[in-house]
Amino acid sequence: MTDLEADLRKAVRGEVGFDVTSRALVTMDASNYRRVPLGVVAPRDADDVAAVLEVCRAHGVPVVPRGGGTSIAGQATGTGVVLDFTRHMNRVLALDAEARTAVVQPGLVLDRLQDAAASHGLRFGPDPSTHSRCTLGGMIGNNSCGSHSVAWGTTADSVAELGVVTARGERLRLGQGWAGAPTGLRELVDGELARLRTGFPELPRRISGYALDALLPEHRADVARSFCGSEGTLGVLTEAVVKLVEAPRARALAVLGYADEGAAAEAAAGLLVHRPLTVEGMAADLVPTAAALPRGGAWLFVETGGSSEREARARAEDVVRAADVLDALVVTDPAGQRALWRIREDASGTATRMPDGSEAWPGWEDCAVPPQRLGAYLRDFRGLLVSHGLKGTPYGHFGDGCIHVRIDFDLLTGPGIARFRRFSEELADLVAAHGGSLSGEHGDGQARAELLPRMYGEEMVALFERAKGIWDPDDLLNPGMLVRPAPLDTGLRFSVLPRGPVEVAFGYPADGGDFSAAVRRCVGVAKCRTTSVSGSAVMCPSFRATGEEAHSTRGRARLLHEMLAGEAGGLVTDGWRSEEVREALDLCLSCKGCRTDCPVGVDMATYKAEFLHHHYAGRRRPPAHHSMGRLPRWLRGVDRVRAAAVVNALASVRPLAAVAKRLGGIAPERRIPKVATETFSRWWDRRKARGAGGDPVVLWPDTFTEHLSPSVGQAAVRVLEAAGLRVVLPPTVHLEKAPVGDGRTVALDPVSLLRGRGRVCCGLTYVSTGQLDRARTVLRRTLDLMAPVLETSAPVVVLEPSCAAALRTDLPELLHDDPRAAQLASRVRTFAEALEQLAPDWRPPALNRPVTGQTHCHQHAVLGDLAERRLREAAGLTGDLAGGCCGLAGNFGFEKGHFEVSRACAEDQLLPSVRQAPEDAVVLADGFSCRTQLEQLAGVRGRHLAEVLAEALRSGEGADTEGGP
């Protein structure tokens, strides 16, 4: 233990982390930069903050305050001690609805403040797109804004008082009238009045540099406002009194379509006279599909408010009439507005991948110019991009003249980094020429501080340095930011990554087969750190359960980054054998939620499988990998010797079950599910085939349906046949030229007889436990068995969502060298998709009942659930299913040591939704894991949608099932 660490542990009550994981998690923010700290402290209160500053000052070690770590200019990273305020100093201390103020701690996430204020009809005005994870301390440090700044201004406009501890331990209360000003600050301002009155550009989004002009007499010498945007370089914020505004009772969203971004930019300033709440802009190259948007190549999102929906809509329609648009859409439905706003909010991550798949990066994320000059600036900006051979996709706060853009800089090679510098210098000159600010929202950090003289001139920057010296004479706080900055092209986070390919098992097609590029996808916007989910969203259940950065998608990506860096400067130096990475990935549920919910499509489930594959190569695996990872093999063995009844009987004897669970690495709190005494395939063999003639649909007998819940398969057969489809099962023998069989085909040639009967398998359990060599073997055998099917056009219906997702994604990504893999993946249909596409005229029985339950996480992340929603609606099943993850997640919730996290995940969304449902609600759970979790934790029987429809068909409920739609 170092002297610094020992002294900190003696001095503070909060956690002190000098271990590899604690440090690795904060090496980066959402910028291009990386700094390795000495340690991390999570202070419990202002006394802890003061103690940390005293110890670090004695050791000559810098201190960096950090909130949510979403800063995009590098200011939330440092080489000394990082203060993590999100763990303890994260509360609303008081809220005065009459005075419209709140007292908050720096680690409070903005959405939590909004939740507290909403019950009083109030809100905090600024709202960055990272509102679900950014903190008030970070917002004050950066003087953040958000989409509503045209109505409510920047964070500085919403600050009344600030509690601050200086680097030398002085506790100050900052406010107007020089309140809290350190000694010497007033004298500095009094001697530079003329410069301060003329040296700052006039525009709503001037964030760059220190706001020393707020100290002028005509601005009430507002020390608190001047402190905003100082990026942790002047003092450490411990408390803030912030102003709240009245929230409109109703809102309407006008989406205005224009030919291109230039036309949208020219129009934005003219709409401000209508006093909108937002004027946001984006172009078509950031929109995956424009189906929900009006006609055009670029759009303005203009939000209006009112005391009623009618008033809000009227104001939005006034905006539409005043705007010269190609097309327009006005939405008052809150769900419809949320869906449209998600397109805009996800742009900060979506923009990191260009339409051609190439990478794009921050660094020039948020320049701002006077709104009236935005169109001209954008034309010049586009020209500058072209002259440097670069591409970018601008979007952002058009009403305030603030543009976000990610640019396809090459930050991996010397020539690319040199071009990054030249472009940065020329763009700084261009912004200054248009009377703008290098930063319009996110601060200067390392990305732009070096260029501040191009905006302000050398004398003003020298004045900034003098102000820094008054506040922090020892340069202890976040050195290298704003004044005396580090060069903008040093400390780039990619410099430590390997340049050659990393040998991996998956194909990573979206990243050119490069695992390093896959890990680089995480840019740190931290959507995975949200503490609540909306709609059917899933990511990240383990973070919501633990609140630990190490168990977020971003945290795991950071550790993988350090692992790849290895001996080149990474904190993790033992590569794939790293215990730190294994521990962080241990609580990843492999829910695949990040594959969809992460704006840049980080796929941590795949990264986890890849890591486990290498980590255990040639080594002894945990018992759970044998007991549950090879579940298909064990269950087929039980069926082969007809031992299901015996297994169930033994599992019901507690001492025997306890021994089995201990040997199998199964959580002692879990009950072992019963094995079906008759498998789905045996039921199929003894029944008489029914159904219409015509082309067949191949029903996939996944392991869970086959051995654990055959009733789902039986129900699906009944419904599919009722819909007029001919159901068959996959072949069980490899026949080179056999027709598509029904599972009963017997081979006559000796070679096929020697090969014996087999069963298709998606390889899911092998993939989730990282047994990728075995998974490939199983999948190649499956492709051999399915060869006759692939010679036809028969679709493959998969009832278990996790198995369908494995076939859609894991199969082609693991066997990327086998064209049959992609062919089979393209045939996969869910139960609802099969009915919708293959029996479009069939009408399901009308149940006319509410539903509850949860959309399967793999359904949400990989398959999509629109067909399921439409099928439920057609059957009169009303209501939405919850999002999140059930927490069982295949083998995860059964593994020893995972039970508490598994239960916490279930309590996040699934169990509350079931408890709050009406008594007559149908509990839907298409996944075996979801049904098991409901049964074991809530005593509730969930059913697959196929079972619900089959039961209705048997009982004769509902209308005519033979008619048209």
Image: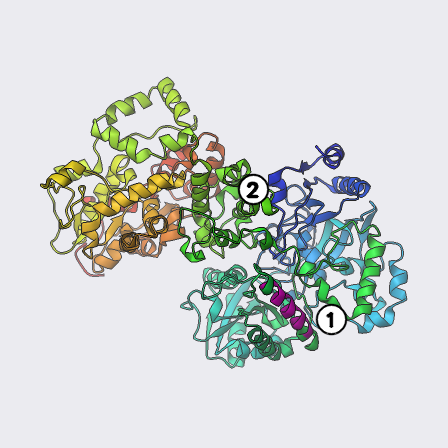
Asked whether residue 321 is drawn in magenta, I would say no
Q: Quadrant of residue 151?
A: bottom right
Say whether residue 698 is left or right of residue 558: left
The location of residue 193, given as percent across then percent down, is: 87, 69
Say which residue label 2 marks: 550
Q: Nearer the viewer, residue 602 or 514?
A: 514
Q: Which mark, by number, is residue 658? A: none
The location of residue 470, given as percent across then percent down, is: 85, 55
Q: Look at the numbered discs 1 and 2 and tell me whether their residues touch, using CB distance below 8 Å.
A: no
Q: Quadrant of the C terminus?
A: bottom left
- SS category of the residue bearing label 1: helix
Assess disc 1: are there few (<14), some (14-19) or many (≥20) residues with their C-alpha within 10 Å of its C-alpha.
Answer: some
What scheme was used to colour the molecule? Answer: rainbow
**Whether residue 756 is visible:** no
The kind of residue on which mark 2 rests is: Ala
Q: Which residues are magenta?
A: 416-429
The kind of residue on which mark 1 rests is: Arg
Say which residue label 1 marks: 454
Majority SS type along the magenta span: helix
Q: Which residue sits at x=43%, y=57%? A: 512
Q: Quadrant of residue 703?
A: top left
Say whether residue 334 is left or right of residue 28: left
